[in-house]
Amino acid sequence: SGKVLGLTPAGTAKAWVNPILVSIGLALFSGLAIGLLYLDAKVVPYLTYLLIAATLYIAFVIFSDKTLNFIEKQRISVIFIVAFFVIFFWSAFEQAGASLTFFAAEQTQRDLGFFTVPTSWFQSLNSVFVVVFAPVFAWLWLKMGKKEPSSPTKMAIGLFLLALGYLWISVGVKDVGTGIKVSMIWLIGMYALHTWGELCLSPIGLSLVNKLAPFKYASLLMAVWFLANAAANKLAGVLSALYPDGKTTSFLGYEMSNNYDFFMLFVGMAGIASLILFALTKKLQSMMHIDKE
């Protein structure tokens, strides 16, 4: 058609760029990034404030742009709202690489008589389940046609499935005495439910950002999505440290003295987030203005 591709999106503010200054800036930023790896542990916790500051700065830059109309700003607001909710999902989901791995190693019966299942194999379950169930979910959404849930609804379902996964394993460890190991079926079932939740949330969220973001802010708003993921991983680390390995821990006044208490923390956290997001879905749908396209 003769149309030139790869040009700057229409409406983007013109900027004067000096290649030398850009090179110097990138070099300084790279040095800072590398230096963060060697910071003392007492300084690292302040990185949480960096995440918050970055998010607030991006929000200020975007919402202060007078070239954006009302519909565009409402769509951007939806991105920020759903990004907030994914923090609750990933902070619980990412226990797979921390507390759940410890649970698999120390409190799961992995001996099959002729073979002991390595702890690391449980880390592969999510990948296997994604390959197996991704086509099923893709088929399901297409099969539902006009009855297909909206993106916010799918994400709320994802949070619900995550909570259900932790509820499943909570049942498995309830009233189990110290030193007694539980069947692998509880861990496998939980990972299956978590993968289903991931398939309802992760690809849907990425697609939603691309769909709602104005062209000139597409990359910046994708950064908001991944900032939420970064915040979730930070929270996941904090929560995994509360694993009650022979001691009583607490989070926001909720005390945990055993695995049941610990897993129920995530049931409550993801479950409440799911209910709130379900309640907001109609409002978020109207703010998306899909019918205006």
Image (tube, grey):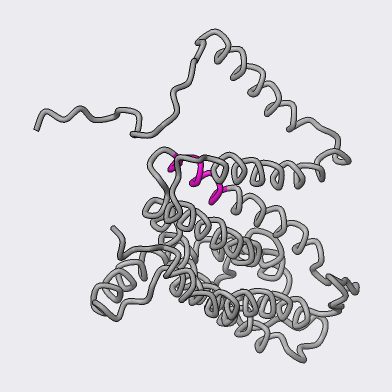
Relative placement, left or right, of 10 versus 272 is left
Residue 219, horizontal then vertical, whole percent: 46, 40
Give x and y (percent) for residue 27: 62, 16
Q: Quadrant of the C terminus?
A: bottom left
Q: Main secondary structure of the magenta part?
A: helix
* Residue segment shown in magenta: 217-226
Q: Considering only vertical position in the picture, is 73 above or below 149? A: above
As for residue 221 lying within the magenta part, the answer is: yes
Q: Could you say where residue 208 lies in the image, as x and y percent from the top left?
A: 41, 58
Q: Residue at x 32, y 77 (%)?
A: 148
Q: Is residue 282 magenta?
A: no
Q: For this rendering, which residue is in front, 124 or 26?
A: 26
Please name the residue shown 38% across and 41% down the image: 215
Residue closest to the far top: 20
Residue at 77% across, 58% down: 238
Position of 253 with respect to 93 (left or right) is right
When the figure is inspected, residue 223 is found, relative to residue 10, above or below; the finding is below
Query: 267 or 190: nearer the eye?
Result: 267
**Residue 88: % across, % down:** 64, 66
